[in-house]
Image (cartoon, coloured by chain):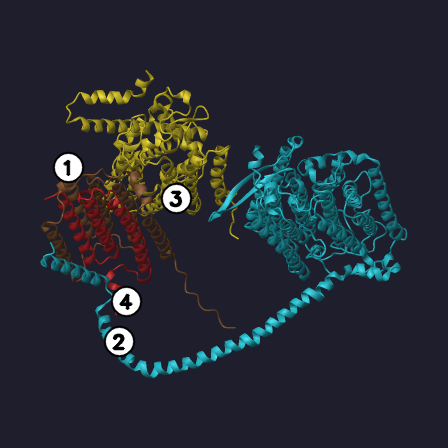
Chain colours: A yellow, B cyan, C red, D brown
Amino acid sequence: MAETLDQAFVLLKQWLVDRFPADLQPLLSAFLSAAAIVGVFAGLFAFTTWLERKGLARIQNRLGPNRVGPYGLFQPIADGLKMLTKEDIVPRSADQLVHFLAPIMKVVPVLLAYAVIPVGRNMVATDLEAGLLFFLAVGSATELAVFMAGWGSHNKYSLLGAMRAIAQLISYEIPLVFAALGVVLVAGSLSLPAIVDSQAGYDWGGLARWHVFTPWGLAGFGLFMIAATAKTARSPFDLPEGESEIIAGHMVEYSGFKYALFYLGEYLSLFAISGVGITLFLGGWREPFSWLAWMPSYVWFGLKLLACIVGFIWLRGTMPRLRADQLMNFAWKFMFPMTLVTVVAAAAWHLSAGWNFTGAGLWRWALDAAVILIPYRLLGARHLAPRTYRFAD
Amino acid sequence: MNWIVHQLWLIPALPFLAAGVLALTPRRQRAFAARLAISALAVSLALSCAAFVATLGHAGTGTFRERVNFTWFQFGDQALRLGWVLDPLAAVMLVMVSFVGLLIFIYSVGYMAHDANFTRFFCFLALFAGAMLGLVIANSLLLLFVCWELVGLASYLLIGFWFHKPEAAAAAKKAFITTRIGDVALFLGMLWLYSAGGTLLFYDAGEGCLENAALARIAGPSLVGWGTLVGISLLIFGGAIGKSGQLPLHVWLPDAMEGPTPVSALIHAATMVAAGVFLVARVFPLMKPDWPSLAGGIPLAGTPPPDATLAITWVGAITAVFAALIAVAQTDIKRILAYSTVSQLGYMFLGLGVGGVAVGMFHLLTHACFKALLFLGAGSVIHGCHDEQDIRRMGGLRRPMPVTFATYAVGMMALSGVPLLFSGFWSKDEILHAAHGWAGSRIPFYLGLFGALLTAFYMTRQMVYVFFGQRRAASTPPAAASGIRHPASGEPHESPLVMTVPLAILAVSAIVLGFLGTPAWPWLQTYLGADHGGSGGVELAKLLTKETLWLMAISTAVVTAGIGLAWRWYGQRPITDAGTPDPLQMSFPAAFRWLRQKFFVDEFYAATVIRAHAAWARFSDLLDAWLWGGLVLAVHFLTQGLSWASRFFDEYVVNLGFDAACRRLRRDGAFAAGLSDGKLQNYLRGIGTAFACLLVLLLWGGCR
Amino acid sequence: MSPLERYLIVAALLFGIGLAGALTRRNAILVLAGIELMLTAANLNFIAFWRYGGHPADSGTGIVFVLFSIAVAAAETAVGLALIVTIYRHRHSTKLDEFDELKG
Amino acid sequence: MDAAFLIAAGLTLAAAVAAMSLRNLIHCALCLVVTFFGVAALFLLLGAEFVSFAQVMVYVGAIAILIVFATLLTRSAGVTGEPLAFQPWLVGLGIAGLVVGAIVTSVAGSGLLPTESSRIVAAAPSTRELGEQLMSTYVLPLEVVGLLLTAALIGAAVLGLREPKPSTPPPKP
């Protein structure tokens, strides 16, 4: 029964596909997967906007949306309708084609990225062998969309915002890649389902063997999530939008549906990158304890994704925005070396897997933790120290 | 096997690691430096205690000796193997070294608080402690030698810590070079041992060089074998002489007082000098082989042939008295203690020679405690008196420095051997007892007694000078600035808690430690003797006999006489002025001069060894300047002449044709340069055209 | 036309377009872009030969070569663009035919 | 398969022509991106999955962005008045045409090229095998490329640094 529940969607799709002639089957299968992804994650987007507004309101001690539907639950629908019916304004001096293509360029790669994320057991649209690389490659197309929007609008704020955003995206792409590299090193594969499989099994009688439960994995997960925050331009790294300085950055000249597309693209990339983070470090759709194995895999993935989203919302409600120089210093002087260190630590962990003498486990832990903690002390002490402000002196 | 045996390497490794980290630590990280070094040694102490407990559990059941050997590297079919060993001897040394070392570390925090190179100091201290701990656990003479040299290096660095002071630099050099003489002997002994025995491992499942099989192989069935064994032993003992400052290589030890006082304490109590004694104790089976049990038989059947212990005994006994005599006449508070150390080390060797490992080691342990106590006390006094070291300018410190006074008194009584309550009494008595029963001669026993008398005398003299009477500091200006901290005028004051607490702890242990080896309960002897039982004169059953009591009475009398004599000369008529000559000097001016000048040993060395060296160096210099210099000059002129000829040929024969070629080349070059017009795309065009032409040519040429 | 030839001809055309761009455009950045196109064409050749070249034992050389080539292209672009920006700072121009300081 | 090839090749070539001939430099750069995507698609058709993704990541993610940045930094964006090329542009076009002609002729007329049947289709190396080859057979080139990239990074950074104003020599005392 649990098995059937777990595979419910897979079986459903199989049943549907089998109704059709064999020629059409691959096409239909792909179409169904794509439709499911688009439907589910667009729905999640709507839900998340509501959740974010409610959550931020809680943090800021106000009520949040509460007029449309119970608890304001239909607020996203109202917002969507409003967006769709708004006038689509294109500045006269803008580069029409580029201005038009930018939001599409933003959303399409993000949707492509979902093709390789396993959302449940046997539930991945395409199991590419170089799936992680695909994800990263597709993700790098976002920068182009940002640039197109910024430059195509022919507005100095949007261009400045775009330049800022690109600098940030490129700077944080490197730590992102390196943080993921440790997992690749240990799992020995770039395929995301294979990485999930590499985290199968349990240690210490029931605790799942996720990468996040190792020293390097913990550090890598933290670094990955920080880089992901920056990569999706969320607070405290939301300089590209920086509404108090450059209004809304590259999106300043967009309105109506195009703006909604940007908005959608941002949230979709947030989900996608969280999904990859979950896959890399949190065991993907695997359950944390052996006695929870009866719950369907996609439920676990959804729960983890929700936890990540809540974490992001919490972060947004808590942290102030960084300054541009702080952002860059943090990326190059802390994130980048630290992710390199995690790669080294992952290699050390991988190499020490063969140790078998008394206390090998403890030694391994201690060694790995030392590999991470010592550079962390050396690098982090400077950045995490209380800031002293020098006023005009 | 106990887990601690496998992790034993951590004990020296932790201080080494701390030293390594501290070497890279910036100078301003003072708190971090102290914390790191102290915590590293504290962990070492904890591990040492664990090791000690591990050996304790097996003490009753015979030999506890666990070793871990590994191959360092392999060349040909020879494998160089190292390892570490845990046995009672190593265990007590580990605990002693790390315990005393830890207290000295803590004390140093206070003593060196104002020094600019605090971090460097702790780096060296940690290195020192680590090297000594490594030496203790070494299961190979080679590893021991490596650590031995590290100890020497660390002592060099620390004695010369204030290297901007010429005396300190000279003292460091002197210590290094003098001990090096002994080290050469040790190195030769090691090589000989390797060639004779084929291994440098001490214990290796019956194959080690201290075990009977190997000993039998070295000793062989003949007189030659016996000579080999004694020769190796004497060479190794030569190393110990250098390290432990025995006659005639004792001259570096008093000069080593130029280092900071905690360093002196460390050198004299826990690490440097103890290394020599420990070495002899470690290789004791080599020094005093158990002849009957060696297979093959001995040509001199019946009485066992003399071995190296004979030399050890005599060197120890003579040094004990010799150094004590010098100590009587010194005025520097630390120098007195230094000579006292030399003398006490003589006692230890005497004990090793006549009584075996347990006797010598017992004195080593007790001495480590009370000598560390005395040195740290002296440091406290110096600290309190603003860097005054001359006892003639102290006096009356009993009242301003009560804690220091009390602990110092404990140390002094322990060193003098005041009966029953103090550890020095028991350990010294043990040695005297063994010497009394020695078969060779009675003279070492009498020398030992005389030394005890002198010890009590000079310690009392020092106590009286420093703590009794009245303040004499203001009466004469200080002779010279010592240390980087210039003496400041002001009243003496008690040292901070971080210095006095270690003193108190050491004082307690200076008392308590003695009860581990009293004749009534000779625990330490059985503990150590479990292995070396057959080798010494310790016969447990006789320890409470009439003879023992009689000996204790004699030594009590001697100590009392020493203290009384000193009190009569120095205590009854308080010395009021720093310029007043010593009462002893007034009574025996000539003898006192000899003692004050340390029997002119340094001068004797300067007149013989050093002068010979200088002469040889001058001769070499002359040889260099005239003979070799002349040769070089001749070659120089020859080369110069040839060069002139060559140049002439070059300029007037070769260059003419070359110049013509060059002119031509320049003309053509100018034309070619015109072709490159600096425009990138023109070049690219050229390349493209050339490529296309080439391809067409190839196609045409039928390359298909 | 065999599949290999198809790809080779596409690569040749791509190379030609890149070369033409590099030869005719004045802007240094575009010249660099043309060179990138030529490199890409070369990469396409590598992959085509790897796929259809008839060396089944040699399973990875073509791919590895292209990976290295991509890395080299990245390095070349970075340094080239930095040079262009630096030149622009001094000369306030990116027109290649204006830079002829190196003429003989 | 054939249609896919035609689409990818046509897109690539058309975008390449556009990238080399448009007047607005930003448009050129964007067309360049399309070209790169097209080449990546060709790589995919050839079965080189890994290279295809790497191509997208490096060329689109890094090189195109760099070109765009350089364009903006040198203020040559949006220059529309500039003539297509400088004086002897026909010469350049002719040379390029010559080269292409020569290559195409040699390719089309060559009997040396293996036909499809001669290829025994071996399984494309998996990413893992590729990684193992990189780390064993090609480890030296890999290191050299790493060194090259580092040198390029440092070189580009040094070139990009603002030069300090040439300081006047201190007055003689």
- Judge by depth and name the residue closer to the eye, A368 or B372: B372
Q: Which mark is residue A245?
A: 3
- Judge by depth and name the residue closer to the eye, B446 or B633: B446
Q: x%, y% of residue B424?
A: 77, 42
- Judge by depth and name the residue closer to the eye, B559 or B652: B559
- Judge by depth and name the residue closer to the eye, B50 or B438: B438
Q: Secondary structure at mark 3?
A: helix
Q: x%, y% of residue A271?
A: 34, 32
CA neighbours of label 4 inside 10 A, class few (<14), some (14 to 19), many (20+): few
What residue sits 35% from the left and 36% below the top? A188
Q: CA distance from mark 2 to mark 4?
A: 18 Å
Which amino acid type is shown beneath numbered disc 4?
A: Leu
In this rendering, the label closer to the viewer, 3 or 4:
4
Are tags 3 and 1 found on a single chain? Answer: no
In this rendering, the label closer to the viewer, 4 or 1:
1
Which amino acid type is shown beneath numbered disc 3?
A: Glu
Which amino acid type is shown beneath numbered disc 1?
A: Met
**Residue corresponding to mark 1:** D1
Which amino acid type is shown beneath numbered disc 2?
A: Arg
What residue sits 19% from the left and 61% below the top? B687
Q: Secondary structure at mark 2?
A: helix
Q: Is residue D82 above or below residue C40?
A: below
Q: Is residue B251 left or right of residue B209?
A: right
**Residue corresponding to mark 2:** B666
Q: Which mark is residue C102?
A: 4
Q: Quadrant of residue A346?
A: top left
Q: x%, y% of residue B246?
A: 71, 53
Q: CA distance from mark 2 to mark 1?
A: 62 Å
Q: Quadrant of residue B429?
A: top right
- Is residue D101 visible from the viewing direction of this image? yes
Q: x%, y% of residue B337?
A: 75, 51
User: For the N terminus of chain B, which image quadrant?
Assistant: top right
